[in-house]
Image (cartoon, rainbow, N blue to C red):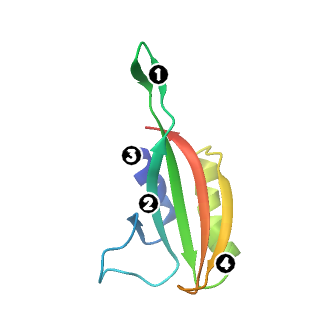
Amino acid sequence: MDKLLEIIGEIDIPSAYDHFAEGEAVDPPFITYLLPGSDNFSADGKVYYKINDVHIELYTDAKDPEVESTVETVLDEHGIFYDKSEVWIDTEKLYEVLYSFQMEG
């Protein structure tokens, strides 16, 4: 998790794990990140190699290629292969760009 926190820090956008606490919300752009699962490798009935699924969710008021480029540059600099998807959340009036990848845990 230390490596992930380093990466999040380099992106230099307000961030929180999973969500911002009530009363601590920030104006977009902001990031939430979470570790929704794992894909560990086992040997001899034990976890031999830990692999975490990682989601970095970028939220913006409008489509913002410059902010997306900032996130992608940091991920690229760390050699992270990611999948990217995007959705408009009408109830929140926000774009969510999701970066999904795996990293050693």
**Observer-nearest of 87 and 70:** 87
For label 2, the crowd category at 10 Å Cα-Cα, with few meaning under 14, some 14 to 19 and many 20 or more, is few
Residue 88, x across and y down, in percent: 64, 78
Give the residue number, with chain letter if any, for mark 2: 9
Cα distance, mark 2 to mark 3?
A: 12 Å
Give me the residue at 36% from left, 73% from top. Answer: 20
User: Between marks 1 and 2, how big is the CA–CA gap?
Assistant: 31 Å
**Callout 4: helix, strand or loop?**
loop
Count of labels in the image: 4
Residue for badge 1: 42
| Cα gap from disc 3 to disc 4, whole angstroms | 28 Å
For numbered disc 1, what is the local secondary structure?
strand
Q: Which residue is mark 3?
A: 1
Under mark 4, the amino acid is Asp
Q: Residue at x 64, y 84 (%)?
A: 62
Residue at image location 55% in from the left, 69% down from the top:
58
Q: Closer to us: mark 1 or mark 3? A: 1
Question: Identity of the amino acid at label 3?
Answer: Met
Q: Residues within 10 Å of mark 3 (few under 14, many from 20)?
A: few
Q: Mark 4: few, some, or many residues within 10 Å (few <14, many ≥20)?
A: few
Q: CA distance from mark 2 to mark 4?
A: 20 Å
